[in-house]
Image (cartoon, rainbow, N blue to C red):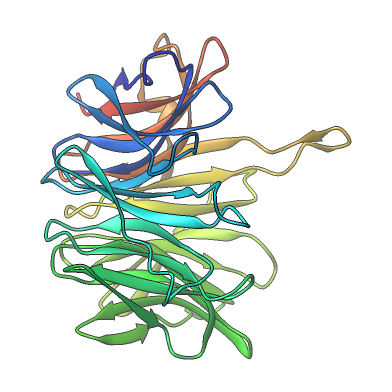
C-alpha cells in the first residue's frame, strides 16, 4: 500500500479517523490536540464541519456516498454536557437529538445512502439503547431486554449491527432488519461476541471473546462465526471494517506496559488474510513517515482508513491505497 496523509483542519496538528465511504472520503476529527472539531477528509482537503453550539467540540463518526456525515457533540449548555447526535448535509449541521425519547442524549455512529442513521441514545445516566433515525423520526430499537445497547453500522439494505447487554446476562452482537432483532449467538469455546461493521451482502465483522480473557477478530456470515485469529503478543484483536470482497481490517491491542506511570499497550492495525492477521506496517514503505496504529475501515476499492503516528509523534488520519 501507498500511504496518503489526510492531514488536519488548518491550524490543527492532530487528526483522527472514524468513518470511510466507497468514494475514498473519510469522517473524523481534528484537534490541536486538545478540543476537537468534526472533519470531512475529501479530495486531499480536511474540512471543518463546525459545531451545533458555539465553543463546543464535535466528532464526525460516519459518512455515506451522497455527502451526508453524522456524529455527535457534547452540549456545554446542558447540565451534564449531554451528547447530541447530528446530521451534516448540504453544508449545514442539523441536531437530530430526541430529548423525549432519550433524555440523556444521543450519539450517531452510522449512516447509509438513504440517509438512515444509527447510534445510541441514553435513557438515564447508566442505561442506553440503540436507535434508528429516518425521515426526521428517531426510533428506539432496544433490543428487547437490553440494559445497554449501541448500533454501530447500517448498510444500504437497512441492515443494522450493534452490541447489547442485558441485566440478566450477555446478549452480545445483534442484527436488526425489517423491524426485527436477531442475536448473533456465541460460537463454541467463546463467552461473548460483538458486531461493529456490515457489508452490502449482510456479512458482519466484529470479535469473539473468551472466558479465559482476550478477544479475536471474527466474521459472522449466514449466522455462523469464523475466528480470524490473533497476533502474537497481543492481548486481543477485533475487526473494525469489512467490504463486499470480504476483506476485513481491525486493531490488535497489546498489554499495558506500565501502571505507574501509566503506559498503555501499543495498537497495531491489521488486515486479515488466508494465513492470518497481517500487521499493516509490513505492507507500507519503510520510509513512509508513519506508524499505523489502528485500521478503522476498508471500502470496496480496498482503500484502508487508518490512524497513524507521524515522525513528530502526532496522530494523523491516513489512507492506505492498494498498489
Position of residue 292 measured from the top left corner of the image (x, y, whole percent)? 46, 28
Examine the rendered structure and indicate whether residue 238 appears above or below residue 51.
below
Please identify the quarter of the rendering in which residue 28 is found: top left
Q: Does residue 217 appear in the picture of this structure?
A: yes
Residue 102 or 144: which is nearer the viewer? Answer: 102
Residue 180 or 73: which is nearer the viewer? Answer: 73
Position of residue 147 measured from the top left corner of the image (x, y, whole percent)? 56, 81
Examine the rendered structure and indicate whether residue 148 appears above or below residue 74.
below
Query: In the shown orientation, is residue 92 left or right of residue 311?
Result: left
Examine the rendered structure and indicate whether residue 109 appears above or below residue 12.
below
Query: In the shown orientation, is residue 255 left or right of residue 36?
Result: right
Residue drawn at x 33%, y 51% is 241
Residue 146 or 131: which is nearer the viewer? Answer: 131
Q: How many numbered marks, from 0 up? A: 0
Residue drawn at x 42%, y 61% is 206
Position of residue 79 measured from the top left corner of the image (x, y, whole percent)? 62, 57
Please identify the quarter of the rendering in which residue 96 is found: bottom left
Please identify the quarter of the rendering in which residue 301 is found: top left
Residue 230 or 316: which is nearer the viewer? Answer: 316
Q: Does residue 190 appear in the picture of this structure?
A: no
Query: In the shown orientation, is residue 190 left or right of residue 226?
Result: right
Residue drawn at x 37%, y 57% is 108
Residue drawn at x 63%, y 72% is 126
Amino acid at each position: 500500500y501507498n500511504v496518503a496523509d489526510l492531514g488536519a483542519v488548518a491550524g490543527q496538528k492532530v487528526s483522527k479517523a472514524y468513518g470511510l465511504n466507497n468514494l475514498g472520503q473519510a469522517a473524523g476529527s481534528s484537534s490541536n490536540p486538545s478540543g476537537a472539531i468534526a472533519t470531512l477528509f475529501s479530495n486531499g482537503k480536511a474540512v471543518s464541519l463546525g459545531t451545533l453550539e458555539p465553543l463546543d467540540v464535535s466528532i464526525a463518526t460516519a459518512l455515506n456516498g451522497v455527502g451526508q456525515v453524522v456524529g455527535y457533540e457534547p452540549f456545554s449548555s446542558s447540565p451534564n454536557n449531554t451528547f447530541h447526535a447530528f446530521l451534516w448535509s448540504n453544508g449545514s449541521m442539523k441536531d437530530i437529538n430526541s430529548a423525549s425519547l432519550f433524555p440523556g442524549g444521543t450519539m450517531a455512529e452510522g449512516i447509509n445512502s438513504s440517509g438512515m442513521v444509527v447510534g445510541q441514545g441514553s435513557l438515564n445516566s447508566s442505561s442506553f439503547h440503540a436507535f434508528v433515525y429516518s425521515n426526521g423520526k428517531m426510533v428506539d430499537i432496544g433490543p428487547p431486554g437490553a440494559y445497554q445497547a449501541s448500533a454501530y453500522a447500517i448498510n444500504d439494505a437497512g441492515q443494522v449491527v450493534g452490541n447489547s447487554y442485558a441485566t440478566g446476562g450477555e446478549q452480545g452482537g445483534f442484527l436488526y432488519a425489517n423491524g426485527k432483532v436477531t442475536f448473533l449467538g456465541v460460537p463454541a469455546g467463546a463467552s461473548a461476541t460483538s458486531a461493529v461493521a456490515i457489508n452490502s451482502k449482510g456479512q458482519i465483522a466484529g470479535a469473539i471473546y473468551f472466558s479465559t480473557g482476550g478477544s479475536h477478530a471474527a466474521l459472522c456470515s449466514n449466522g455462523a462465526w469464523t475466528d480470524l485469529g490473533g497476533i502474537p503478543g497481543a492481548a486481543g484483536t477485533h475487526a473494525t471494517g469489512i467490504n463486499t470482497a470480504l476483506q476485513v481490517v481491525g486493531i490488535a491491542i497489546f498489554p499495558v506496559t506500565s501502571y505507574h506511570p501509566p503506559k498503555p499497550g501499543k495498537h497495531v492495525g491489521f488486515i486479515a488474510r488466508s494465513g492470518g492477521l497481517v500487521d499493516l506496517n509490513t505492507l507500507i514503505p519503510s520510509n513512509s513517515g508513519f506508524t499505523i496504529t489502528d485500521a478503522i475501515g476498508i471500502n470496496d476499492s480496498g482503500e484502508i482508513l487508518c490512524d497513524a503516528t507521524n515522525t513528530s509523534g502526532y496522530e494523523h488520519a491516513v489512507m492506505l491505497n492498494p498498489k
